[in-house]
Image: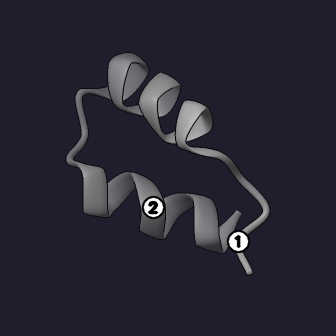
Amino acid sequence: MANYTAEDVKRLREATAAGMLDCKKALDEA
């Protein structure tokens, strides 16, 4: 299970303008 929430993905998307899948992948690797 992932160690992040939808809110984390949303914040990362707003900060980086990256796509949803890219954000999820980055958080999975973090």
Q: Name the residue that disc number 1 marks.
A: 2
Crowd class of label 2 (few under 14; some 14 to 19; many from 20; radius 10 Å): many
User: Label 2 is placed on what type of residue?
Assistant: Lys
Name which residue lies at 45% across and 61% down.
24
Residue 27's mark? none
24 left or right of 18 in image: right
Q: Name the residue that disc number 2 marks.
A: 24
Discs 1, 2 touching: Cβ within 8 Å: yes
Q: Quadrant of the N terminus?
A: bottom right
Q: Quadrant of the C terminus?
A: bottom right
Where is 10 relative to 2, above or below?
Answer: above
| Residue 21 picture quarter | bottom left
Q: Please state the horizontal and vertical placement of residue 2, each as a whole percent of the image.
A: 70, 71
| Residue 16 picture quarter | top left
Name which residue lies at 71% across and 53% down.
4
Q: CA distance from mark 1 to mark 2?
A: 9 Å
User: Label 1 is placed on what type of residue?
Assistant: Ala
Query: Between 16 and 8, which is closer to the camera in this rendering?
Result: 8
Crowd class of label 1 (few under 14; some 14 to 19; many from 20; radius 10 Å): few
Q: How many circles with numbers are drawn on the protein?
A: 2
Q: Please state the horizontal and vertical placement of residue 12, each as a whole percent of the image.
A: 48, 31
Residue occupying the far bottom of the picture: 1
27 left or right of 4 in image: left
Name which residue lies at 51% across and 61% down.
26
N-terminal of the pair, mark 1 or mark 2, is 1
Name which residue lies at 50% across and 23% down.
11
Where is 26 relative to 18, above or below?
Answer: below
Q: Please state the horizontal and vertical placement of residue 7, each as a whole percent of the image.
A: 57, 31
